[in-house]
Image (cartoon, helix red, strand yellow):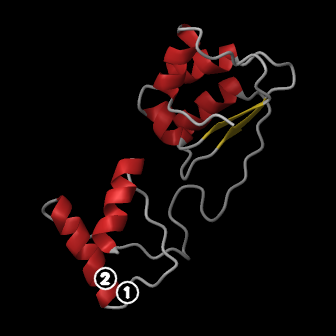
């Protein structure tokens, strides 16, 4: 099992630090973000390095805009799409709210306030940018 960012893995492949020829499954998470933010070339390079004849490819994404779906079809000729909820918008079962905060500290205060007011009841899933940020957030909230 290898978990990596595209850029780091491409560097390792180019440096001959890793051989992907025996990889049997590649999973691209946050596919919409990767394809939308200029990572297409890196993903293409990684797919080219994965030469096993029984390679399986999986893409996961919270959204699938038409341009990203088109790019996905170039690497997966016969994809199977599984859609949970609405394809073009948020699920009706998910409650969303936009809160304006002035800083990183404001985010922490807002989350604490939501917990104290009973509006955020565990279990709760929080997405952050990095492992370091998740550890920091844990320390700040617990």
Image vertical order of residue 63 relative to residue 94, above or below = above
Q: Is residue 98 visible?
A: no
Measuring 31% from the left and 58% from the top, which residue is drawn there? 136
Q: For residue 80, which numbered disc appears in the image?
A: none
Q: What percent of the width, then of the height, locates residue 89? A: 51, 60
Q: Residue at x 37, y 86 (%)?
A: 119
Residue 74 or residue 103, whichever sits in front: 103
Residue on which the image places disc 2:
114
As helix, strand or loop, the secondary structure at mark 2 comes to helix
Side of 54 where 60 appears, left or right: left
Q: Which residue in the rendered view is the most extreme toward the top? A: 15
**Helix, strand or loop status at disc 1:** loop
x 58%, y 14%: residue? 17
Residue 95 appears left or right of 12: left
Q: Circle 1 sits on which residue?
A: 119
**Label 1–label 2 contact, CB within 8 A:** yes
For disc 2, the neighbor class at 10 Å (few under 14, some 14 to 19, many from 20) is few
Distance from disc 1 to disc 2, alpha carbons, whole Å, reads 5 Å
Is 113 located above or below residue 52 in the figure? below
Horizontal and vertical percent for residue 111? 30, 74
Q: Is residue 17 above or below residue 120?
A: above
Q: Position of residue 113 (x, y in %)?
A: 25, 82
Residue 48 visible in the shown view: yes
- Picture quarter with the N terminus: top right
Q: Earlier in the sequence, mark 1 or mark 2?
A: 2
- Which residue is depicted at the point 38% across and 57% down? 135
């Amino acid at each position: 099992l290898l978990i990596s960012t595209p850029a780091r893995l491409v560097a390792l492949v180019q440096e001959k630090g890793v051989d992907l020829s025996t990889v049997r499954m590649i999973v691209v998470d946050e596919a919409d973000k990767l394809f939308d933010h200029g990572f297409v070339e890196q993903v293409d390079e990684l797919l080219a390095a994965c030469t096993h004849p029984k390679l399986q490819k999986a893409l996961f994404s919270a959204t699938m805009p038409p341009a990203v779906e088109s790019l996905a079809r170039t690497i997966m000729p016969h994809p199977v799409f599984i859609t949970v909820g609405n394809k073009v918008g948020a699920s009706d079962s998910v409650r969303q709210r936009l809160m304006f905060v002035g800083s990183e500290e404001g985010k922490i205060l807002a989350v604490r306030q939501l917990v104290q007011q009973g509006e955020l009841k565990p279990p709760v899933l929080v997405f952050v940018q990095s492992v370091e940020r998740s550890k920091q957030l844990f320390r700040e909230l617990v």
